[in-house]
Amino acid sequence: MLGHTGLQVSALSFGASPLGGVFAPVDEAEGERAVRRAIDLGINMFDVSPYYGLTRAETVLGRALAGRRHQVILATKAGRHGEREFDFRKDAIKRSLEASLRRLQTDYVDILQAHDIEFGALEQVLTETYGALQELKAEGKCRFIGMTAYPLPVLREALHHCELDVVLSYCHFHLANTLLLTELLPLAREQGVGLINASPTGMGLLTRQGPPAWHPAPPALVEQCRLAVAHCARRGADIATLALQYVYWQEAVPVTLVGMSKVRHVESNVAAVAEKPRPELLAELLEILAPVQDMVWANA
Ligand code: NAD
């Protein structure tokens, strides 16, 4: 259950940023098949944003969901439109959602979140943007509202000032980082706010292909993750499997979003969480990653 929303979300859910070609070139037809395969395998929540692939991810997701919109919980965002383009004003948030609805081929989303609020003027986000989200909720354009950010203190601040249904945090709960569990989870639980955990591979750090060139992690974290990936391979295991199992089986958060655009990733990720992590391998990985545990980077 996602906080007090009443939404029964699948604990492993679908992050749609790869549908926008954010990590690697995307085959849109394959991306659409991945979405439909995910629904068939029981994944029911899909998270996207106009920012992902500069509207492309929403367009691909909208096509994939045609005829199946009623089967899923659909979440998008507003406020971020480009790498350095943000607009958290009320009118902009409303216009952004209208455009998202057209691309997603629906007349409402289940969740609308202000996207990456640390890049805005917090004073404006917590008043004007928040007001826009509340109005859109009252108009029935979205059922629930929330905010996303990388720095956990910013999300705590948002929770102290606004009545949100959900908050989304990324890269703070994976094999090399558990800050989410101590720095945000207690407050979210206390308030009945649904905590959405994103990026269980640390945006590609804990995958065989490694992080994309734009990844903001400091070199020490990248290097230690590379060693963990290599160790896993020597042991005949796929690090992405361990990364998902590690988060999933702690059962600490209601939902974890993993980014996908390929049918084979959907299938292997769903299969991965059906089993618990191998304890010795997990212990070895945690030992390799201990020197960089909870390392964060500056954002905004
Ligand atoms: P992630 O940790 O989920 O990693 C995604 C990467 O892992 C992609 O390159 C994907 O192809 C790859 N991958 C997935 N399964 C794999 C497998 N089995 N084997 C090998 N590689 C695999 O990072 P993410 O995509 O950034 O996060 C998940 C989702 O959370 C996003 O798609 C987005 O919807 C959301 N998110 C939101 C914010 C925000 O609001 N600011 C930030 C980050 C993520």
Image (cartoon, rainbow, N blue to C red):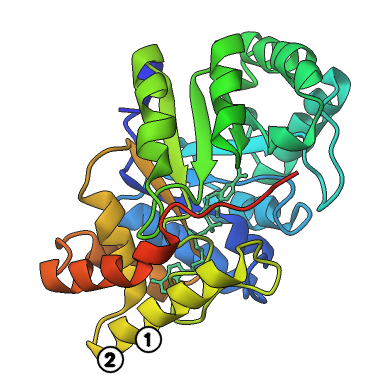
> Looking at numbered disc 1 in the image, what kind of residue is underneath it?
Ala
293 vs 53, nearest the viewer:
293
State the image coordinates of residue 74 (x, y, percent, origin top left): 52, 38
Q: Is residue 185 left or right of residue 61?
A: left
Residue named by callout 1: 230
User: Is residue 101 among what the camera can see?
Assistant: no
State the image coordinates of residue 176 (x, y, percent, origin top left): 39, 59
User: Is residue 210 among what the camera can see?
Assistant: yes
Q: Quadrant of residue 253?
A: top left
Q: Is residue 79 left or right of residue 154?
A: right
Residue at the extreme front: 291
Taking the spot 43% from the left edge, 30% from the top edge, the residue there is 184
Number of other residues with Cα within 10 Å of mark 1, as a class: few under 14, some 14 to 19, many 20 or more: some
Taking the spot 71% from the left edge, 68% from the top edge, the residue there is 214
Taking the spot 62% from the left edge, 53% from the top edge, the residue there is 297
Residue at the extreme bottom: 234
Residue named by callout 2: 234
63 vs 137, nearest the viewer:
137
Query: Is label 1 in a helix, a strand or a loop?
Result: helix
Taking the spot 27% from the left edge, 38% from the top edge, the residue there is 252
Q: Is residue 212 left or right of residue 245?
A: right
State the image coordinates of residue 296 (x, y, percent, origin top left): 55, 52
Q: Quadrant of the N terminus?
A: top left
Q: Quadrant of residue 153?
A: top right
